[in-house]
Image: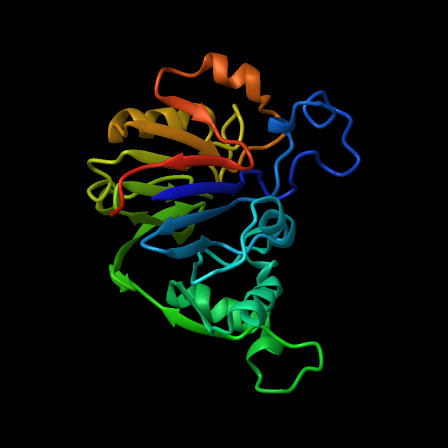
Amino acid sequence: MRIVILGCATSTGVPIIGCKCRVCSSPNPKNKRTRSSLLIQAYGKNILIDTSPDLRFQALANNITRIDAVLYTHSHADHTHGIDELRTFNFINGNIIPCYGSPQTISSIKRNFGYIFDGSLSMGGKPQLKMIPVTDTFNFEGITIVPLEVFHADWVIFGYRIGKLAYITDCSGIPEKSFSRLGGLDLLIIDALRYNPHPAHMSVGQAIEVICRVKPRLAVFTHMGHELEYEELLKQLPEGIMPGYDGMNLYIEDP
């Protein structure tokens, strides 16, 4: 199974528009982050987690020409506003793309992007999507996908587990039911916004606490803000934990 971190930034992206801080001004490409999204390749299928506003750029940068399914964590703009880019994959692959998420997330996406689902014709074309609400473990083309309920402030959203990978972004806490589903991981990709606490996201310290409890073989940070400088953070982290970067490729056993 190949995992590609397409983007690992918080909602503003890094650099932030107009910001002259040392991270936003850094020449290090690992400090240039697009909005959070992940590609999973398993058994010949390409599964995308979230449609970042930067999806077009991410697809071009990583030579992605097919999407077989989309998993949505929640309906915030930085995780959904690239949805219109899916129409290009419809054009080149001739497929209707199934999109999965919680009932609340699917309902919100249908409302926020009503033009896609209203049945009207569009000369420019619209994404051809099948929106599928899920509440628990489901199967896509022989691949078992486990939604993981996590807290995003006072909102319950989804992370996902596929095989020995778990992806948890936009997370301020993990309920016990979801912790019980995180054993035996080879790879945990987890929210780590900044050093200081935040009401809707894990800090670096909080993420490390979760990692120490879950004990994956490797943990990688995502959804990072401009307070986190890649090389400095990498030097500070315990063995087996590292910051992600756009275009990072990771490989684990197929589920």
Q: Quadrant of the N terminus?
A: top left
x and y percent of residue 86 in the render?
56, 64
Residue 4 seen by the camera: yes
Q: Is residue 240 above or below residue 77?
A: above
Left or right, 179 with respect to 40, comes to left
x and y percent of residue 123 in the render?
71, 82
x and y percent of residue 97 in the render?
46, 69
Which residue is at a point 39% across and 50% down the rendered structure image? 41
Q: How is the image coloured?
A: rainbow
Q: Tell which of 63 and 202 is nearer to you.
A: 63
Q: Tell which of 55 and 109 is nearer to you.
A: 55
User: Which residue, as the protein is rendered here, is positioned at the far bottom?
Assistant: 120
Residue 32, quarter of picture: top right
Residue 168 seen by the camera: no
Which residue is at a point 25% across and 36% down the rendered structure image? 185
Q: Tell which of 133 and 86 is nearer to you.
A: 86
Q: Is residue 196 above or below residue 132?
A: above
Q: Is residue 188 above or below residue 160?
A: above
